[in-house]
Image (cartoon, rainbow, N blue to C red):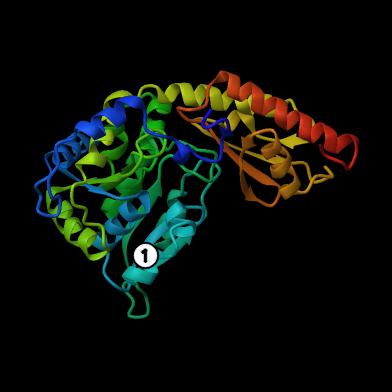
């Protein structure tokens, strides 16, 4: 619970832990644009090691991490193959196109977050003067809009092989890649090794206040550093933020399994509430997506307002659809209270039109 609320809207609502606050207060800092912040440099070294890559770059956000990666991989008029439910396609303000002149080629995401190999191959452009050049395949792991699905190593290996046959590069938006690694019981580097570059967020399940990392070959990261500056991402005494990131990587990864357990508990509880539709068996990580029965006389805004009266927050995720995300500041008692609140609100709606 945070500030008296059970806030399940996202794992981005997490506050830094006491250990992070102490590390931030004690952080050794310098000008990171000059490459002189020792704490940032240490974070980048640890991040690269965790992902099995040569180098890493600290940036302000996951959106910036993906944007800088795409701008470094692709030139204007190049094309990236991306899922039609991908965060880079739906939720990053069209930055690849608006700022990079990069053309997205969406193909359908499957329920498990994957792109079918045959769909990827069919989307690769031929050498025709009318076509943009396909440069990159972009994946997402875990997949936000596909119930937090974790893409397994075998699938990633197959995409890598396809990309190699066609001379393409592979990027993974790994905002929650540590969730995937914990769920699949493999090192994060095993998921990252099949991609040229991978990004991950410190400010979601890892609980740090700010920041993401881009990991990849040293030459790529050198160029990405220039692109980061171009989009206004050069930070100065950023070691204050990087210090929290180091604590996150040291202390917050293994405990993600607790978030996954609570998400499954939430999903199983929701499945028992009449008027709620959910595929509880699909919950692998910390994201739960559910629906209100179309016949339930409960408007979406009324549902959210009634939950807010009970100090529970969830996120509207589309018509009759909602998302709940577990994180460090949600415990078992919070899950029980959230389930009681949802059952009460839905039950009242089934009995009559008035909520209280």
Instruction: Identify the image quadrant of residue 12.
Output: top left
Q: Is residue 121 above or below residue 160?
A: below
- Taking 147 as reference, is 290 left or right? right
Query: Where residue 254 sits: x, y (%)?
Result: 36, 22
Instruction: Identify the image quadrant of residue 7.
Output: top right
Give whichever of 236, 253 is nearer the camera: 236
Give whichever of 301, 187 is nearer the camera: 301
Residue 196 shows up from this direction: no
Which residue is at a point 37% across and 75% down the rendered structure image?
131
Outermost residue toward the right in this view? 352
Residue designated by label 1: 96
Instruction: Identify the image quadrant of residue 26.
Output: top left
**In what quadrant of the picture does the C terminus appear?**
top right
Give whichever of 279, 259 is nearer the camera: 259
Which residue is at a point 46% across and 49% down the rendered structure image?
115
Query: Where residue 92 sits: x, y (%)?
Result: 43, 58
Q: How many marks?
A: 1
- Taking 179 as reference, is 308 left or right? right
Q: Is residue 310 above or below residue 323?
A: above
Give whichever of 83, 224 is nearer the camera: 224
- Taking 108 as reference, is 172 left or right? left
Query: Neighbour class for label 1 at 10 Å: few (<14), some, many (≥20)?
Result: many
Q: Is residue 228 above or below residue 345?
A: below
Which residue is at a point 42% across and 62% down the rendered structure image?
123
Query: Where residue 178 sits: x, y (%)?
Result: 36, 32
Q: Secondary structure at mark 1?
A: helix
Residue 345 shows up from this direction: yes
Query: Where residue 331 sits: x, y (%)?
Result: 53, 22
Outermost residue toward the top in this view? 332
């Amino acid at each position: 619970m945070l500030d008296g609320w059970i806030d399940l809207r996202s794992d981005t609502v997490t506050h830094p832990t006491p250990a992070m606050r102490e590390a931030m207060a004690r952080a050794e800092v310098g000008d990171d644009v000059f490459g002189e912040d020792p704490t940032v440099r240490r974070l980048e070294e640890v991040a690269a090691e965790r992902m099995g890559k040569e180098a890493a770059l600290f940036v302000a956000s996951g959106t910036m991490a993906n944007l800088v990666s795409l701008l470094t991989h692709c030139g204007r008029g190049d094309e990236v193959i991306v899922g039609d439910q991908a965060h880079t396609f739906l939720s990053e303000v069209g930055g690849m196109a608006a700022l990079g002149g990069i053309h997205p080629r969406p193909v359908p995401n499957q329920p498990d977050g994957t792109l079918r190999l045959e769909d990827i191959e069919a989307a690769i452009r031929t050498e025709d003067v009318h076509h943009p050049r396909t440069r990159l395949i972009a994946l997402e792991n875990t997949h936000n809009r596909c119930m937090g699905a974790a893409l397994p190593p075998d699938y990633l290996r197959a995409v890598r092989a396809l990309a190699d046959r066609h001379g393409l590069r592979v990027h993974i938006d790994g905002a929650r890649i540590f969730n995937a690694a914990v769920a699949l019981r493999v090192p994060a580097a095993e998921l990252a090794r099949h991609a040229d570059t991978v990004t991950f967020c410190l400010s979601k399940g890892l609980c740090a206040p700010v920041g993401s990392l881009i990991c990849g070959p040293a030459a790529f990261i050198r160029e990405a550093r220039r692109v980061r500056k171009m989009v206004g991402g050069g930070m100065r005494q950023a070691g204050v933020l990087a210090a929290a990131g180091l604590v996150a990587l040291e202390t917050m990864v293994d405990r993600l399994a607790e978030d996954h357990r609570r998400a499954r508990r939430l999903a199983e509880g929701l499945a028992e509430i009449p008027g709620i539709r959910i595929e509880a068996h699909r919950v692998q990580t910390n994201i739960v997506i559910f629906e209100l029965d179309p016949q339930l006389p409960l408007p979406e805004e009324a549902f959210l307002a009634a939950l807010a009266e009970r100090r529970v927050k969830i996120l509207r995720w589309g018509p009759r659809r909602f998302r709940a995300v577990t994180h460090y500041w949600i415990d078992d008692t919070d899950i029980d209270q959230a389930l009681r609140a949802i059952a009460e609100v839905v039950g009242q709606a089934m009995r009559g039109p008035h909520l209280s």
